[in-house]
Structures are given as C-alpha cells and as structure tokens.
Amino acid sequence: MDLGLTDRLVVVTGASGGLGGVLVRTLRAEGARVAAQGFTAAASLADEFADDHGTSVIRADLSDAASVDAMFRQAEAWGGPVDAVVAAAGRWPQPRRRIDETPPDELDQALTDNLRSAVWTARGLFGALGRSGPRSGGASLVLVGSTAGRFGEAGHVAYAASKAGLRGLCLTLKNEIVELDPAGRVNLVEPGWIATERVRGALAAPGAVERATRTMPLRRVAAPEDVARVIVGLLSPVMSRHLTGTIVPIAGGMEGRVLW
C-alpha cells in the first residue's frame, strides 16, 4: 500500500534516540523527507545521515521555545512547508525514587524533557501551519507518550506525570489544529518497554524481561520498529485520515494487573 508519504516533509524530534533514529529511517523508506532534530548528539546524528540527501539534521534546544521556532523555520528553508511532526524527544530519569525522595529540580527537568518540549514542538508546528496554510491530505502531529502516563510507574513519578500530560495536550490540540488545517490531525502513542540501546542493559538483568512483561498477553519487549511503524501509519493521510485525538498503546496488550 502506498501510504501517501512520498515527498512529505516530516519533522522528527529526538532523532538521536533509539526510537527516533529508527523512525527517521522508516520514514525515508516510505519516501518522506525528514528534518531530524538533535541537540547534544546533533553532530553524531549529522554524521549518521551525511550521505542521505533526503534528511536534514537540525540542532535545536527543545526546552527553549525560540530555538524550536527557529528549527521549524530552518526545516522550511531546507524542504518547504512542514506536513507532519513526530514529537519523539523524551528521557526516562534514573534512578528509581519515591515522590518524597524526588528533588524538585528532577521533577522540573522531567517536565521539560517530556512535556514542555512537546508543547513547544506543537506550538512550532502550529506556527508553521499559520505560514503555509492547510497541507494536502492534512497536517499530522504524533506525540510519543508512555504507558507510564496511562498506568503510572512507581518510582518514576516525574516521568509518569509528564507523560500523562501529553494526553491532555493531544485531546486539546486535535480541536485546535482544524482551525489552521481542516484536515489536520493530532494523535498520541503510548509505548511500553522498547528494546533500545539505552535500556538493553537493564533488560539483560536476570528476570528483567519476565518482570517487564508480566502484565502483557504478548510476552515480549517491543522492538523500535514496532513503534515506528505505528507512528508512520498515523502520519499517513491514506491510512489515518479519519483518526484524530486517538491514544494508541503499543505495549503488547499491557494491563494494569498482573497476568502471569
């Protein structure tokens, strides 16, 4: 099936992460052009995609609204009007702490990394739509949340609270985007455990996978490609033109109870 993504310009934040890099490559395989955001790892990201003329790496600080606005203008200068955005940037904080043990600055940092960055990214897309007008097939924004925002996650209150905030953001913006683009859509995915480089060490510990999957009927940890393909489907004006305000868990059927 042709997903209708050929030559569409997609901005991907967090492109230097384990999911973000796979997402960029999956979008490129569908013919999309990608403006890939990085910050501390922007140089290595640029090296990775140096030979790919359909990918432009942009260094931007997602905690700063002005930097995000500049990122969108840079993407437009490179590839024309922005058609879609994936807000994939985020960080799972370590170590495990109870709420009374969580320093205030750690909570604030988690809100910046996982919620405020998505708010500024959405704001940047809306500004870009104000400049370009409606996009063919409708503009699309996909926010990347977490099952921690759906079920909670003991020991990671800052992360869970920040990811839960994306639900309210999604359900608000799906009503606002149509003021700029009548076919515009906003959706949210909530992955569970993903076997990225960052978490493979934790998953390698004895019994870790069994503990992680004990609330899941599909007893395996997702590969980054499992999540990327769902996101690409949500971006598609062919597959998902009538999906907006949808919250999609990508977690093997995870429930808020122990199954195994």
Image: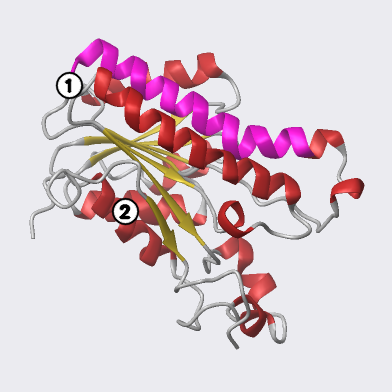
- Relative to residue 142, is residue 138 depicted above or below? above
Question: Reading the chain from its start, which is encountered first: label 1 or label 2?
Answer: 2
Q: Which residue is depicted at the point 35% across and 15% down?
A: 127
Give the residue type at disc 1: Pro
Q: Which residues are magenta?
A: 107-134
> In the drawing, what numbered circle is on residue 25?
2
Does residue 247 appear left or right of residue 258 in this picture? left
Does residue 31 appear in this view? yes
Question: Residue 129 in magenta?
Answer: yes
Q: Position of residue 145 (x, y in %)?
A: 51, 49
The front one of 246 and 233 is: 246
Mark 1 crowdedness (10 Å alpha carbons): few <14, some 14-19, many ≥20: many
Q: Quadrant of residue 147?
A: bottom right
Q: Position of residue 192 (x, y in %)?
A: 53, 64
Does residue 217 appear left or right of residue 41 in this picture? left
Give the residue type at disc 2: Arg
> In the drawing, what numbered circle is on residue 117?
none
Does residue 228 appear left or right of residue 45 in this picture? left
Q: Which residue was labeled with disc 1? A: 134
| Magenta stretch: helix, strand or loop mostly | helix
Q: Quadrant of residue 71?
A: top left
